[in-house]
Image (cartoon, rainbow, N blue to C red):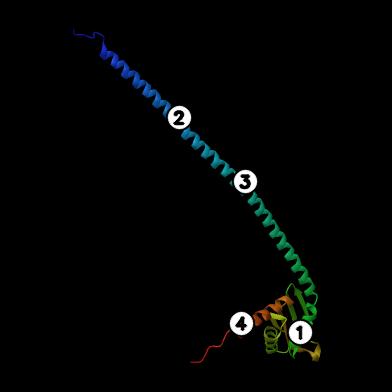
């Protein structure tokens, strides 16, 4: 006996395939949503971790900026203290400068020159006087520039003809003004230290052998 299925089987299969597709689509959506949530959570955790690191770095940079400011302030205070110390040392050493100046003038002023005054401003001394000739002034400049351990860099500011005395005793002389620098003891010791170092270097350097 032949059996004939009169039910709409094709329509039933289509509904089954459609339901399976919908279930698969819903499962895929759920899985995709879960993956997005997982990846988003990982990225959010990484972002939060990096933000924490950045905040830590900013806080440390702020601390370093404060320390740098403190160091700069300390450096300025140290420089100010050094300047004060140097000023005190210069004041102490400058007390003896008039003695050195008078002693050097006695030694370096040649015959034929009469000093009528001098004026010191900082480390420069203006020397005023009379000379019998221009050659005497030139000799004075040479002595002050080359022969004096305390005086340096003499400059002739002015020289002019003048008369000294009255009546029969009038004499023609040259009125001059010379500007010369006076060294401090520490300035005087620096060239000596440098020459001593050069002597030590030359003494320790082995001599070249002759071929």
Q: In the figure, residue 73 lies in which quadrant? A: bottom right
Q: Which mark is residue 34?
A: 2
Q: Is 202 in front, or is 21?
A: 21
Taking the image as shown, residue 34 lies to the left or right of residue 50, namely: left
Distance between the alpha carbons at the discs numbered 1 and 4: 36 Å
Identify the secondary structure beneath mark 2.
Answer: helix
Q: Is 165 in front, or is 108?
A: 108
Whether residue 78 appears in this view of the structure is yes
Residue 128 rendering spot, x and y as whole percentages:
75, 80
Taking the image as shown, residue 109 lies to the left or right of residue 209, namely: right
Looking at the image, which residue is at 70% across and 76% down? 187
Whether residue 180 appears in this view of the structure is no
Distance between the alpha carbons at the discs numbered 4 and 3: 52 Å
Distance between the alpha carbons at the discs numbered 1 and 2: 101 Å
Q: Which residue is mark 3?
A: 59
For marks 4 and 3, the one nearer the N-term is 3
Q: Which mark is residue 162?
A: none
Local packing at callout 1 (Cα closer than 10 Å; few below 14, some 14-19, many 20+) is some
Judged by depth in the image, the label closer to the viewer, 4 or 2, is 2
Distance between the alpha carbons at the discs numbered 3 and 2: 37 Å
For marks 1 and 4, the one nearer the N-term is 1
For marks 3 and 2, the one nearer the N-term is 2
Local packing at callout 2 (Cα closer than 10 Å; few below 14, some 14-19, many 20+) is few
Residue 140 rendering spot, x and y as whole percentages:
70, 86
Residue 88 rendering spot, x and y as whole percentages:
78, 68
Q: Which residue is mark 4?
A: 201
């Amino acid at each position: 006996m032949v059996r004939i299925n009169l039910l709409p089987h094709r329509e039933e299969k289509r509904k089954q395939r459609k339901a399976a597709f919908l279930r698969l689509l819903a499962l895929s959506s759920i899985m995709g949503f879960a993956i997005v949530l997982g990846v988003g959570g990982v990225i959010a955790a990484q972002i939060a971790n990096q933000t924490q690191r950045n905040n830590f770095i900013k806080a440390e940079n702020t601390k370093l900026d404060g320390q740098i400011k403190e160091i700069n302030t300390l450096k300025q205070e140290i420089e100010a203290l050094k300047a004060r110390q140097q000023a005190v040392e210069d004041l102490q050493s400058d007390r003896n400068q008039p003695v050195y100046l008078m002693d050097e003038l006695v030694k370096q002023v040649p015959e034929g020159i009469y000093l009528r005054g001098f004026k010191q401003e900082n480390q420069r001394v203006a020397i005023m006087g009379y000379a019998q000739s221009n050659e005497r002034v030139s000799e004075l400049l040479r002595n002050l520039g080359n022969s004096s351990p305390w005086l340096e860099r003499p400059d002739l500011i002015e020289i002019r003809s003048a008369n000294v005395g009255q009546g029969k005793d009038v004499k023609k002389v040259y009125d001059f003004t010379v500007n010369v620098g006076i060294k401090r003891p520490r300035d005087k010791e620096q060239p000596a230290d440098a020459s001593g170092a050069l002597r030590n270097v030359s003494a320790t350097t082995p001599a070249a052998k002759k071929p």
